[in-house]
Image: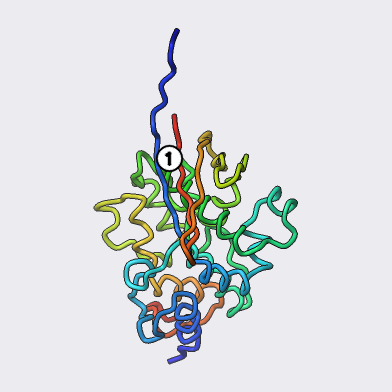
Amino acid sequence: MTVKTRRLHGVGVDLVSRSRMKMFLSRHRDMITRRFLNDSERRRRTNIGLTELAELFTAKEAFFKACNEPWMGLGGFRGMRITERRGDGFTMEWKVAGTRRCYRGEGVFFRDGDLVGAHTMIWS
Amino acid sequence: MNNEIFKKVQETLAGALGVDASDVTPDASLKRDLGAESIDFIDIIFRLEKSFDLKIPANDLFPSHIFTNERFVKEGMVTPEGIHELRTKLPYLDLGAFDKDPQVVKLADYFTVKMILRYLEERLGKSSGCSGTCKS
């Protein structure tokens, strides 16, 4: 029997304070909906909540880091999506627009008081 | 000196980054000196759009399109062609000595207050009086 071994491509961690995110959301709710969320996220959430946005943001930011790609701004964020969520665990995918690069990985959310974070790993 | 743009930028960045307006000098690096992180770059774009009543398209102020082109970035380094692209498409971004160590992850260190001022001068057709590229 052949055992398939996985190799770690990258690890990413991100952390954001809920108070910072609250300020961001209250100031730019409309722009966040139109320009940060992608189509499928917009369809699912007509009125995104603070914790949900904090989780989505940290997951995407952590995934950027795990991919070892440079920060690609709003276009990069829109290109990523959480493909499955189970409790605090999730899987993610990013097809980098305009390239053949596609990353798939997994992650876990964590919280500590005011902080919301995500830890992601990409296996090749 | 017409520094209305500069004052508005100072207020915008101080509000977004939680720093003193006096710390927002033209040469300050958004990341290294003012502590900007990813969420702050997005906040800055949205706040500038509101303050100046304009739309800042993706890739306009903080470049990302070059990162998706394998001619411009290879193995984490911006190629000479990529540097040329940056200089041509983003003339307000002062790359200084970036070409000596063109690690793509270090590009954000070159995002300065002056870069924003130059960008706004170009978009608004006015001088901020502070970017060193006065158009009178």
Location of residue B111 by image quarter: bottom left
Q: What element carries label 1?
A: loop
Task: Please state the horizontal and vertical placement of residue B60, each as a whole percent of the image.
Answer: 53, 61
Q: In the image, B7: left or right of A53?
A: left
**Is A8 on the left or on the right of A27, as rendered?**
left
Residue that lies at the very extreme toward the left in this rendered image? B100
Instruction: Determine the residue positioned at 39% across, 33% down.
Output: A8
Query: Compared with residue B126, is residue B94 higher up or lower down, i.e. above or below?
Result: above
Residue, x 50% and y 59% (percent of image)?
A: A116
- Rendered image coloring scheme: rainbow
The quadrant the C terminus of chain B occupies is bottom left
Identify the residue shown where x is 54% and y is 56%.
A57
Whether residue A6 appears in this view of the structure is yes
| Residue at image mark 1 | B71
Query: With respect to residue A76, does A115 lie above or below?
Result: below
Q: Dividing the picture into quarters, in which one does residue B98 lie?
A: bottom left
Image quarter in which the N terminus of chain B is found: bottom left
Taking the image as shown, residue B4 lies to the left or right of residue A31, namely: left
Q: Which chain carries label 1?
A: B
Amino acid on which disc 1 is placed = Arg
Q: How many marks are shown on the rendered structure?
A: 1
Q: Position of residue B68 (x, y in %)?
A: 49, 44
Instruction: Estimate the x, y position of residue B57 in percent, counting from the top left.
Output: 59, 62
Q: Is residue B44 visible?
A: no
Q: How crowded is mark 1: few (under 14 residues within 10 Å), some or many (20 or more)?
A: few
- x 54%, y 50%: residue: A76
Residue that protrudes farthest toward the top in the picture? A1
Question: Is the residue B52 above or below the residue A54 in the image?
Answer: below
Q: Which residue is at the far bottom?
A: B1
Q: Could you tell me residue A18's position as x and y percent?
A: 53, 67
